[in-house]
Image (tube, rainbow, N blue to C red):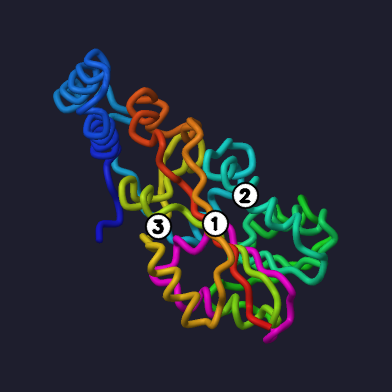
C-alpha cells in the first residue's frame, strides 16, 4: 500500500462518483459541469488545492498528536450524525463504571460523566489525553491501546468506542478487549466510519499545521466482519444504526473546493455505523 496519495486523484474520484451516481437521473446541467470540471483539473493541476500535491500518511499516534490541536475546533459531519445516536443509547442506561476506549479529546468521556458514570478514558495519544482532561476533568485517564486495554477483566459496566476501530487492520482483538473488560450484563457501544465511505473515499484526511494535508489510514470493516467479531467474543447485538450524510463537508480540505460534486457523491449514503451490543449475563 502507498504511504501517500495525491489531491488530484481524490478530486477527480469524487467528481466521477458524483457523475456515476447521478448519470441516470441527474440534471443535465449538473452532469455537464462535472465533466467540464474533470477536464479542467486534468489539464491544469494549478487549479487544484495545493496544485494537486501529495498527501502523506501518518501513523495513528503521530496523526492524532498533530490533529489534537485542532480536532475540537473543526465541524465534522461524522460526529454530528453519530452523537445523537450514541447519546440516545447512553440515555437509556443506568450509571456505573464506564470506559471510553480510544477517547481522543474526551467528547464521549464528557458525555459519560455528565450522565453520572465514573469514567475511565483510554487513548494511545498523550496529546489527545491532555485535551480530554480539559474537557472532562473528573474522569480518570490511562495511556493504552484498543488492542491491549489497561483494565482488569470485568471491571466496567459500559464501554464506548467512537470512530476508532477503523484504524485497526482487523477487528477481533479490539472487540475481544472490550468484551473482556465489560462485566456480564453490561453494554458496549461502538461507532465507526461506515464501510461505504471508507471503500469509496479511503483515508482520514485532515489539515496538519497551517495548510498541509495529511491522513491516518482507515480499514474497511464490513458489517459481516463486525458480526463475526462480536460472535467470537460472545457478544449479543441489540441494534445497528446507520445515520446518513448530513451535507457537512470537511473544512480546509479538498471537498469544499468541489462542494457540489462532493455533496452529490455522498448524498443519501450512511457515513457512520453505530453498534449497540451487550455481554450476556
From this viewpoint, is residue 8 visible?
A: no
Q: Position of residue 228 (x, y in %)?
A: 42, 75
Along the horizontal axis of the image, is 189 left or right of 95?
Answer: left
Indicate the quadrant containing the N terminus: top left, top right, bottom left or bottom right.
Answer: bottom left
Disc 2 or disc 3, which is closer to the eye?
Answer: 2
Indicate yes or no whether the magenta region holds residue 154.
Answer: yes
Q: Which label's residue is closer to the chain start, 1 or 2? A: 2
Which residue is labeled 1 in the image?
Answer: 274
Which SS class for mark 1?
A: strand
Marks 1,2: beta carbons within 8 A: yes
Which numbered tag is attached to residue 85?
A: 2
Along the horizontal axis of the image, is 200 left or right of 230?
Answer: left
Q: Is residue 53 above or below residue 216?
A: above
Start-end of magenta stretch? 152-176
Q: Position of residue 181 (x, y in %)?
A: 66, 80
Disc 1 or disc 3, which is closer to the eye?
Answer: 1
Q: Is residue 76 above or below residue 247?
A: below
**Nearest the eye: 162 or 90:** 90
Q: Residue furthest bottom?
A: 153
Q: Position of residue 59 (x, y in %)?
A: 43, 61
Q: Which label's residue is closer to the chain start, 1 or 3? A: 3
Which residue is labeled 3 in the image?
Answer: 218
Distance (Cα) linking label 1 and label 3: 17 Å
Distance (Cα) linking label 1 and label 2: 7 Å
From this viewpoint, is residue 138 visible?
A: yes
Which SS class for mark 2?
A: helix
Amino acid at each position: 500500500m502507498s504511504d501517500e496519495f495525491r489531491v488530484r486523484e481524490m478530486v477527480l474520484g469524487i467528481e466521477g462518483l458524483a457523475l456515476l451516481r447521478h448519470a441516470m437521473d441527474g440534471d443535465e446541467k449538473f452532469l455537464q459541469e462535472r465533466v467540464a470540471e474533470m477536464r479542467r483539473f486534468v489539464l491544469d493541476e494549478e487549479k487544484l488545492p495545493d496544485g494537486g500535491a501529495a498527501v502523506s500518511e501518518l501513523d495513528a499516534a503521530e496523526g492524532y498528536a498533530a490533529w489534537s490541536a485542532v480536532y475540537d475546533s473543526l465541524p465534522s459531519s461524522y460526529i454530528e450524525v453519530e452523537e445523537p445516536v450514541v447519546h440516545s443509547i447512553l440515555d437509556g442506561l443506568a450509571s456505573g463504571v464506564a470506559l471510553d476506549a480510544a477517547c481522543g479529546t474526551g467528547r464521549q468521556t464528557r458525555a459519560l460523566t455528565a450522565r453520572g458514570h465514573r469514567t475511565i478514558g483510554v487513548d494511545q495519544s498523550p496529546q489527545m489525553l491532555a485535551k480530554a482532561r480539559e474537557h472532562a476533568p473528573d474522569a480518570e485517564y490511562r495511556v493504552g491501546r484498543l488492542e491491549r486495554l489497561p483494565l482488569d477483566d470485568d471491571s466496567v459496566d459500559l464501554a464506548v468506542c467512537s470512530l476508532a476501530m477503523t484504524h485497526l487492520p482487523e477487528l477481533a482483538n479490539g472487540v475481544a478487549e472490550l468484551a473482556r473488560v465489560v462485566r456480564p450484563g453490561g453494554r458496549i457501544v461502538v461507532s465507526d466510519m461506515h464501510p461505504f465511505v471508507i471503500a469509496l473515499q479511503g483515508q482520514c484526511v485532515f489539515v496538519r499545521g497551517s495548510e498541509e494535508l495529511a491522513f491516518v489510514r482507515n480499514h474497511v470493516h464490513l458489517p459481516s466482519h463486525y458480526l463475526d467479531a462480536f460472535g467470537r467474543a460472545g457478544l449479543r447485538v441489540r441494534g445497528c444504526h446507520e445515520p446518513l450524510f448530513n451535507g457537512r463537508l470537511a473544512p480546509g480540505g479538498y471537498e469544499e473546493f468541489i462542494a457540489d460534486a462532493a455533496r452529490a457523491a455522498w448524498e443519501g449514503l450512511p457515513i457512520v455505523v453505530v453498534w449497540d451490543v451487550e455481554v450476556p449475563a
